[in-house]
Image (spheres, rainbow, N blue to C red):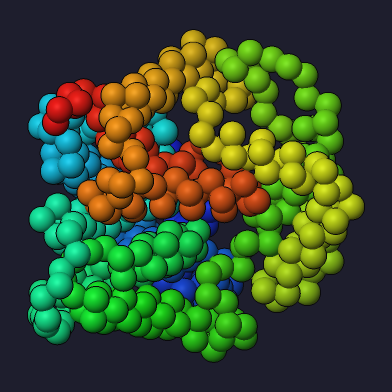
């Protein structure tokens, strides 16, 4: 945070300007002049809304306040990672997992930017922690046959889980898939009675529908369209599926991981700027969606190949070579992430017996970890992808790697 302090002033995704506009005008939007704002759904609401509380009386979001917020979120991520690993593995594994999260280059870099990677990672870890502590407790793994209805504790569990999943979706629409996978798993968690599990599922789903529905209704009123996520999805899909990127994939040379150069999107940006504009951000986003679908329809083979490339890029250990990024830095980061992957393979080898389907009930506590990997892989195989987008799964990877330290008999 000290060495990259000035990076907090940058605003690559317009979260800062939306937060300042919201604090100054009371409108979740982009500034029009000095005192007016145009409502927008360009970004999901949670992070800008949270930042708006840190805007000072002059209408400015100061760097120190953002730095403190990012430090608090990062500290929470480390703490909850430690406690999850302590509960599921061992104290030594917990120390290892929390250290891996602490020194992870992606999380460190993103913490110095006004972007959602830091808060998204925290929300995922807190949600998984609640699942471990309350939903997938080891003592509740066996199915219950006793009769009984819903208790206050069950209601609390469902309300908190539904609220956390709602915050995740309002932070990143990608998490809708993850939230659905977790909610759908509630009826088979094995805890309490089947009637109570069904009721918990309904409560969790109702809270999620209410939270996302409120954002959708707001957008219908303010933007004129029932946008449940953002008006940015079309751009993200087109960024991943355009002729310039497809041509790059067809013609890219074979290079070592530490010399692999990233795609230069200048040609794409020029084509994107030439698309017809109506001034309606939802309609403009639909134009981007249509352009992406057109590219996919014309070049289906490249689409499927690009899906594979995007998924591998999401999880690749070595970052791309870019201007100003030294080879030594790329090698160090790549080796660190390769070490994490190697430890995960060791953990799989050491505990292969526990991966047998007959042991599925104790793995209920791990379902959010499995689901977030599936979610990120599936969504970013189609939409734009790069290594920073795996940030929410880094604590998951770290805990899985720390399992290599746990003995087979434990």
Q: Position of residue 79 (x, y in %)?
A: 17, 42
Question: Residue at point 14% right, 84% down?
Answer: 149
Asked if residue 253 can be seen in this view, the reply is: yes
- Tell me what residue is drawn at x 59 percent, y 34 percent: 312
Image quadrant where one finds the N terminus = top left
Decide which of 406, 160 is in the foreground and name it. Answer: 406
Say which residue appears at 43% left-offset and 66% top-offset: 180
- Left or right: where does residue 358 sit relative to residue 173? left
Estimate the x, y position of residue 402 in percent, counting from the top left.
25, 28
Decide which of 131, 326 is in the foreground and name it. 131
Asked whether residue 284 is in view, the answer is: no
The residue drawn where x is 67% and y is 23% is 261
Quadrant location of the C terminus?
A: top left
Q: Position of residue 128 (x, y in %)?
A: 27, 53
Farthest bottom residue? 221
Report which quarter residue 153 is drawn in: bottom left
Taking depth in this image into account, of 336 and 3 the one nearest to the observer is: 336
From this view, report whether residue 226 is shown above or below residue 32: below
Q: Is residue 393 above or below residue 190?
A: above
């Amino acid at each position: 945070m000290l060495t990259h302090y000035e990076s907090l002033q940058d605003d690559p995704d317009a979260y800062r300007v939306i937060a300042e506009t919201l604090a100054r005008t009371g409108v979740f939007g982009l500034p029009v002049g000095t005192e007016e704002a145009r409502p927008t759904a360009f970004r999901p609401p949670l992070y800008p809304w949270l930042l708006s509380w840190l805007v000072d009386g002059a209408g400015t979001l100061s760097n120190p306040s953002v730095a403190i917020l990012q430090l608090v979120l990062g500290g929470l991520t480390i703490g909850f990672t430690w406690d999850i690993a302590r509960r599921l593995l061992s104290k030594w594994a917990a120390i290892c997992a929390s250290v891996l999260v602490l020194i992870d280059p992606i999380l460190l870099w993103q913490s110095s930017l006004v972007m959602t990677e830091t808060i998204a990672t925290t929300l995922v870890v807190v949600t998984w922690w609640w699942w471990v502590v309350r939903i997938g407790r080891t003592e509740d793994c066996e199915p219950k046959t006793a009769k009984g209805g819903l208790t206050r504790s069950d209601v609390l569990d469902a309300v908190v889980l539904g609220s956390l999943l709602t915050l995740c979706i309002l932070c990143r629409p990608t998490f809708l898939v993850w939230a659905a996978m977790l909610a759908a798993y509630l009826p088979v968690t094995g805890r309490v009675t089947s009637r109570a599990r069904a009721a918990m599922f309904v409560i969790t789903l109702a809270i999620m529908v209410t939270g996302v529905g409120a954002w959708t209704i707001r957008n219908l009123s303010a933007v004129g369209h029932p946008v449940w996520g953002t008006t940015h999805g079309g751009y993200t899909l087109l960024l991943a599926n355009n002729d310039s990127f497809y041509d790059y994939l067809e013609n890219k040379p074979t290079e070592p991981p530490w010399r692999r150069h990233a795609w230069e999107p200048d040609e794409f940006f020029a084509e994107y700027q030439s698309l017809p504009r109506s001034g309606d951000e939802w309609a403009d986003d639909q134009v981007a969606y249509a352009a992406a679908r057109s590219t996919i329809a014309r070049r289906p083979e490249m689409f499927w190949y690009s899906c594979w490339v995007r998924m591998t890029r999401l999880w690749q250990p070595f970052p791309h070579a870019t201007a100003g990024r030294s080879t030594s830095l790329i090698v160090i980061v790549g080796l660190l992430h390769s070490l994490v992957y190697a430890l995960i393979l060791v953990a799989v080898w050491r505990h292969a017996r526990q991966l047998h389907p007959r042991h599925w009930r104790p793995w209920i506590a791990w379902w959010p970890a499995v689901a977030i990997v599936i979610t990120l892989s599936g969504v970013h195989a189609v939409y734009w992808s790069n290594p920073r987008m795996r940030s929410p799964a880094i604590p998951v990877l770290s805990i899985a790697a720390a399992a290599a330290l746990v003995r087979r008999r434990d």
